[in-house]
Amino acid sequence: MEKSNEKLIKALNKDLEKEMAGIVRYLHHSFIVFGPNRGPLVQMFRAQATESMTHAIQLGEKITALGGHPTVKVDQVFEPGYQSVEDMLAEDLKAEKQQLQLYTEQLKEFGDYNLTMKLMLEQIIVNEQTHVDEMEKYLRTSNESLVVLDGHSRKG
């Protein structure tokens, strides 16, 4: 392994730990969600787990391509016991925002490493921003929505 790759591999392994935690967190939420909206929420949580797994695979493959060894560690997952759907979504939103910030910082630091590294980080950032947007929509109540009619904003 080249000396110049060590810092990048360490950063990617940190990402891998967080993506592995995302898989665990989203699957756990899919198991414990109840109520009339259980079906769509289970689908959403499991889709998010699958997306985290896709990111984990990308990261692991990149780590080995760089001559590193992918970690088997999983970042800590918050487990408070009972959680409402809103609690779960708020926890997921917080984690997605943290991961988005981490990937954005890494793009600044490692984006010039090579084109494929830059593109991989940019694509993951797009995915993470989409997750943040979706979580924020899930947490928004209908009376927070603004409807624009005839150029005037009104509460929806």
Image (cartoon, rainbow, N blue to C red):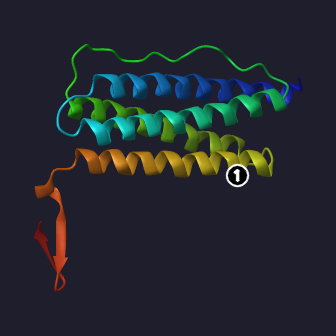
Image mark count: 1
The answer to whether residue 109 is left or right of residue 112 is left
Identify which amino acid the numbered label 1 is placed on: Leu
Quarter in which the C terminus is drawn: bottom left
Instruction: Using the rendered view, name the quadrant where residue 45 is placed.
Output: top left
Q: Nearer the viewer, residue 141 or 46?
A: 46
Q: Position of residue 69 (x, y in %)?
A: 77, 19
Write down the residue under mark 1. 119
Quarter in which the N terminus is drawn: top right
Q: Measuring 67% from the left and 17% from the top, which residue is drawn there?
A: 71
Q: Measuring 14% from the left and 56% from the top, which residue is drawn there?
A: 142
Which residue, as the protein is rendered here, is positioned at the far right? 2
Q: Position of residue 19 (x, y in %)?
A: 54, 29
Above or below residue 110? Residue 5 is above
The answer to whether residue 138 is left or right of residue 125 is left
Instruction: Using the rendered view, name the quadrant where residue 42 is placed.
Output: top left
Q: Position of residue 41 (x, y in %)?
A: 31, 38
Q: Within 10 Å of the Cα at label 1, are there few (<14), some (14-19), or many (20+) other Cα atoms?
A: few
Above or below residue 137? Residue 109 is above
Q: Position of residue 65 (x, y in %)?
A: 83, 32
The answer to whether residue 151 is left or right of residue 70 is left
Numbered disc 1: secondary structure: helix
Above or below residue 75? Residue 94 is below
Q: Measuring 52% from the left and 48% from the top, which residue is drawn there?
A: 127
